Image: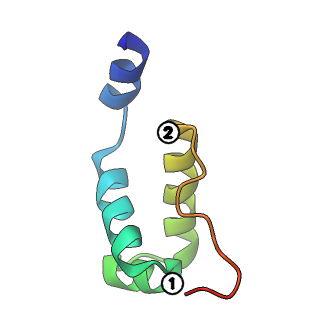
């Protein structure tokens, strides 16, 4: 429990905003446009989220939007 709290305390709250928009849009390009970020910047945010959560998060599915 302490380890999770430490990780959460060190988390960038902007990552939460990015995750919500990514989940809503289900598309990195559209989410980046909505957030007024470059696609590469949003991809880096997603990578940081994945490392922080130790989860793949939002895995691309072939043939699905």
Give the position of the N terminus as an image quadrant.
top left
Give the position of the C terminus as an image quadrant.
bottom right
Pick whichever, 46 or 63, lies toward us. Answer: 63
Which residue is farthest right?
A: 62
Question: Residue under circle 1?
Answer: 29
Using residue 9 as the reference point, say whether residue 48 is left or right of it: right
Q: Residue at x 52, y 58 (%)?
A: 46
Q: Residue at x 71, y 81 (%)?
A: 62
Corner quadrant of residue 32: bottom left
Using residue 65 as the reference point, say whether residue 16 is left or right of it: left
Q: Is residue 34 above or below residue 41?
A: below
Label 1's element? Answer: helix
Pick whichever, 52 or 40, lies toward us. Answer: 52
In the image, residue 44 lies at what x, y percent? 56, 59
Question: Residue under circle 2?
Answer: 53
Q: Which mark is residue 7?
A: none
Label 2's element? Answer: helix
In the image, residue 43 lies at what x, y percent? 56, 65
Q: Residue at x 57, y 37 (%)?
A: 54
In the image, residue 34 lies at what x, y percent? 33, 83
In the image, residue 19 lies at what x, y percent? 38, 60
Q: Residues within 10 Å of mark 2 (few under 14, many from 20)?
A: few
């Amino acid at each position: 429990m302490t380890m999770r709290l430490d990780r959460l305390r060190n988390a960038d709250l902007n990552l939460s905003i990015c995750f919500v928009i990514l989940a809503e849009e289900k598309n990195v390009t559209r989410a980046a446009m909505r957030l007024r970020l470059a696609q590469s910047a949003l991809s880096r945010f997603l990578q940081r989220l994945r490392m922080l959560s130790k989860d793949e998060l939002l895995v691309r599915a072939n043939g699905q939007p």
